[in-house]
Image (cartoon, grey):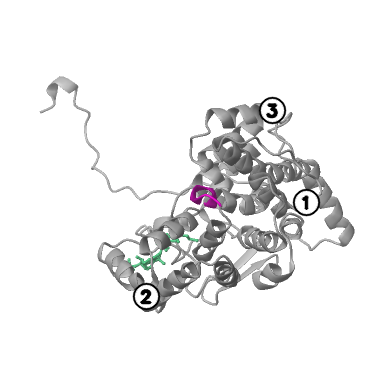
């Protein structure tokens, strides 16, 4: 009997490696659900806190459960003192490098970093969910020569991040938009960072190692860095009339248009539309309608690719929202990380339920077997 020819799945495209009860994605229909609930309903009606609870515990909370969860998140709004020193030392690094390093370091302040029981991971996860935005905001203040802002337990998760970043009480509209943005980014199945976190968990490495690795994977422009690049692109395009030529030039050089395309979606990314309206309203309110117009001109210019399944993704609109709120471009990926933290927690929890070493194969295409030649005998 001849051996079956191995099938190669580059980039693991279309490969199922595990079962999951967290997110379901129908890429052709453009449907995304967390625990069975449509992303559209969650984006319109839920809050980050409620969505995080849903992801971690599997069900929507009662009022009492949500209050308790919210209190736990608020009670964890603190960072160990040496983390401030670390941030100061590396203040000129990219915020994702600072975040990755600080999350890794947080493991050394945990009395039992290797405890991977469900309760322990939930406890660590809740703490980290509160600490991630604090690291991002603290770093931005320190690098701008400002003092970090003391935590405040009266605010929601989204409001608290904006408050610690700017030192000012954010407005209702800004809070609402950011909260929605965090809900939209909270979970997305086996994306590169969640898969990375699962691979690391599969080796029985601890929670901090897994999340640190997830943050590293998110930092790449093909995953989390797109919002940052969309803003740079919008600035480069400059005015709506330039969009067609910009797209043509990028395609001539076989370069991707940022904020378009997705490994899974062939229809529009269902998360994208929820930020679109925000960009439109905000850019008009701020007297900068051209941002929305540039983005729409890019969508028009990309229409020929839309027929081939290359549509706007979640990162297309969010960058402009952050920019219009005066947020530095290099904070866009860390904001994605703030939203995605519950997603990493639940992926790690799920991996631990039936943990297995994740170790695929590479199909060898190198030299035939050959003899070692001592160095003085080589040509
Ligand atoms: C996300 C991304 C890496 C997915 O890559 P992928 O899974 O390999 O893409 P696909 O297999 O769907 O690509 C199919 C075709 O569409 C093209 N395509 C995909 N994304 C494109 C983009 N953003 N701009 C132009 N063309 C694109 C590919 O080049 C490919 O063309 P080909 O068949 O002629 O080679 C890719 O779309 C990309 O780089 N997008 C820009 C970055 C981005 O916005 N990332 C955030 C994702 S949430």
Is residue 210 visible in the rendered structure shown here? Answer: no
* Residue that mark 3 sits on: 81
For the N terminus, the image quarter is bottom left
Residue that sits furthest to the right in the current view: 64
Q: Is residue 331 magenta?
A: yes
Query: Residue at 68% of width from left, 64% of height from top?
Result: 173
| Cα–Cα gap, marks 1 and 2 | 42 Å
| Cα–Cα gap, marks 3 and 1 | 22 Å
Nearer to us of marks 1 and 2 is 1
**In the image, 87: left or right of 300?**
right
Q: Indicate the position of residue 356 as horizontal and vertical percent values.
A: 60, 46
**In the image, 60: left or right of 142?**
right
Q: Which residues are magenta?
A: 327-332
Residue that sits furthest to the top in the current view: 376
For the residues bearing labels 1 and 2, Cβ distance under 8 angstroms: no
Q: Indicate the position of residue 337 as horizontal and vertical percent values.
A: 59, 50
Q: Nearer the viewer, residue 279 or 335?
A: 279
* Residue that mark 1 sits on: 155
* Residue that mark 2 sits on: 301
């Amino acid at each position: 009997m001849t051996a079956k020819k191995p099938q190669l799945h580059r980039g693991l495209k279309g490969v199922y490696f595990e079962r999951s009860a967290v997110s379901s994605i129908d890429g052709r229909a453009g449907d995304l659900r967390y625990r069975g609930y449509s992303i559209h309903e969650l984006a319109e009606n839920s809050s980050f806190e409620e969505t995080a609870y849903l992801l971690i515990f599997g069900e929507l909370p009662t009022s009492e459960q949500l209050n308790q969860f919210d209190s736990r998140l608020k009670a964890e709004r603190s960072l160990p003192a040496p983390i401030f020193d670390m941030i100061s030392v590396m203040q000129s690094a990219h915020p994702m490098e600072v975040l990755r390093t600080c999350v890794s370091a947080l493991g050394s302040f945990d009395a039992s970093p290797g405890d991977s029981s469900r309760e322990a991971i939930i406890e660590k996860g809740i703490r980290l969910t509160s600490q991630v935005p604090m690291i991002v905001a603290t770093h931005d203040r320190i690098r701008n020569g400002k003092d970090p802002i003391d935590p405040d337990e009266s605010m929601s998760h989204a409001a608290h991040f904006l408050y610690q970043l700017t030192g000012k009480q954010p407005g209702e509209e800004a809070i609402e938009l950011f909260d929605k943005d965090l809900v939209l980014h909270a979970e997305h199945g086996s994306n590169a960072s969640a898969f990375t976190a699962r691979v690391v968990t599969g080796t029985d490495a601890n929670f901090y190692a897994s999340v640190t690795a997830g943050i590293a994977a998110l930092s790449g422009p093909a995953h989390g860095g797109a919002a940052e690049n969309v803003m740079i692109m919008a600035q480069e395009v400059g005015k709506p009339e330039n969009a067609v030529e910009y797209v043509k030039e990028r395609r001539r050089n076989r370069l991707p248009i940022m904020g378009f395309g997705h490994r899974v979606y062939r229809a529009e990314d269902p998360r994208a539309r929820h930020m679109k309206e925000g960009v439109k309203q905000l850019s008009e309110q701020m007297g900068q309608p051209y941002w929305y117009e540039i983005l729409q001109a890019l969508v028009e210019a990309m229409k020929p690719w839309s027929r081939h399944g290359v549509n706007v993704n979640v990162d297309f609109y969010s960058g402009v929202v952050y920019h219009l709120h005066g947020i530095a471009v290099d904070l866009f990926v860390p904001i994605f990380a703030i939203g995605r933290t519950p997603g990493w927690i639940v992926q790690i929890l799920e991996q631990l339920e039936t943990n297995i070493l994740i170790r695929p194969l590479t199909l060898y295409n190198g030299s035939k077997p050959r003899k070692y030649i001592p160095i003085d005998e080589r040509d």
